[in-house]
Every structure is written in structure tokens, then in C-alpha cells.
Amino acid sequence: IVVSDLPKAKGGEFPKIRYFTTIAKNIVEAERFGKIWERFSKEKDFGNRLINSLKGHWGRTPLSAHNLFENGNQRMLVERIRHMAERIKDKASKEADIDRINLASRIEDLASSYHLALTLPDNTFITLSAWTWASYSFKGGRDFPTPLSLHVERDWASTDFLLEYIKAGELGDEDTVERKIIELMGEGRESEDLAHHLLGLEKEAERVLIDKVSVLKEIPSGGLTRLTKGPIIEPLKDHRWESKFVFNCASA
């Protein structure tokens, strides 16, 4: 765990939740990487696979292997939070500690709503994710988290969609997805879309737009004759209140 000064303009309204969820997620992610590297160590080309899993650790598309790997970290984090709440509640119940029982109940609520959101009657979209609220506020965000900050909710929904799809089509299960993610990580292809690998879809479509757009040749404008004595500028005698001068633009 790296300890450093708080950057300027950072902190927000929920710094404790931010630190709690971030540190816990980092621990979970380190554990998952450890298991993946242990698996790589039993296969050929261990060194390159390990390096590839770090260098290619990014993704853009909703169904990329990277985004689903990140969602796996968040899901494991939620399970750890639930277990922690259960331990706190069990111990507090034996000691009749009402405050800690209430604390455990709040932590359980945090875990249950971690990936959820709702839309109010006025169409205002509000996330219920503790991670999103804490992260958005920590980075200087105000009011409600914006759609661009809803990474947890997006990746969670994408994972649920992919799993239900491959199960309905009898294409695999959770282990199928996990194996493919690890395979792509070892090859440095974590950014690739799992839909191409698991759903039998074609790879990225070829570009439809051509590089150079043809433009119709413009008709040349007619020639202008410049007056020898310059443009005509004369006062309007009947409309001095509206315009003081008339400028002959065609002669300029």
C-alpha cells in the first residue's frame, strides 16, 4: 500500500469510502493477478505472458476482456465486503453492540447497491454505487456523477449481458469467459472485444467512409470591376437616423 500526500483539489465528500474501496480493490486485483501468473508459470513462455498481462492492461469497448476483468475485481470486492459485514454483525450481536450492528447493516446495504442505479420521475439518473460516488467526488465532481464516470455499472451490466447470452446460446459459462480473458491477457490482447471470440461475431467492420470525399467543382464567380475613384460612399439624406453611410461592397 503506497502512502502519499493528498493531491490538490482532491478528496471530495467521501474520502474514507474512496480509500476503503480503492485499497480493498487493489488487494483483490493483486490476488487475481497472482493466481493468473501462477497459472502462466505452469505454461510455456511464462516471462512474455507475464509482461503481456501488464503491458496490454487496457480496453475501450464495453465487452473488452479488460473491462470484464475489472468487473471481476469489483464483484470479488463486493463479496469480500459482504463477508466483512457478516463478521462484524456476528461479533456485535454476541456483544449486544447496537452501533456495530447498525454499521454492519449499512455495509451490507453498500454491497447490495454497489452496482445499481435508478431513474427518478423527472428522468434524473442517479447511481447507487459507493465506488462511483466516492470516485467522482474525489476527483472534484459536483452534484450527481455523470454518465462518463459510471464504469462499475457499465462493466457490471456488460458482464451480465455476456454471461446470459452465452448461457442461452449454450456457448459456455462463467469459466469459459474467465479462461478467454486469461488467454487474451497472456497474449497482450486484453483490449480485444470478447464478442468476437465468444459469440461468433465478425471482427471490427471495415471502414465504410472513404478517406477522401469527392467535392463537386464549384462554378467560378463572375469578374468584378473596381471603380477607378474607389467605392461609392454617400450619406442617406432621408434615413440618417438608420444608417449614416452606404458602402458599395461589389466595388471593394
Image (spheres, rainbow, N blue to C red):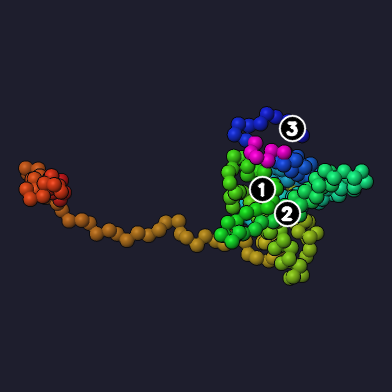
Q: Give the range drawn in magenta.
A: 11-16
Distance (Cα) linking label 3 and label 1: 22 Å
Of labels 3 and 1, the one closer to you: 1
Sequence-wise, which precedes: disc 3 or disc 2?
3
Q: In the figure, is residue 37 to the left or right of 208?
A: right
Pointer 1: what residue? 132
Q: Do the residues labelled 1 and 2 touch (CB within 8 Å)?
A: no
Q: Where is residue 178 in the image (x, y as percent from the top left)?
A: 77, 56
Residue shown at 65% from the left, 36% from the top: 11
Whether 27 is drawn above or below 66: the answer is above
Pointer 3: what residue? 2
Q: Where is residue 92, by image quadrant? A: top right
Q: Position of residue 233 (x, y in %)?
A: 10, 44
The quarter of the image holding the N terminus is: top right
Pointer 2: what residue? 113
**Residue 78 visible within the image:** no
Q: Where is residue 226 in the image (x, y as percent from the top left)?
A: 11, 47
Q: Where is residue 174, by image quadrant? A: bottom right
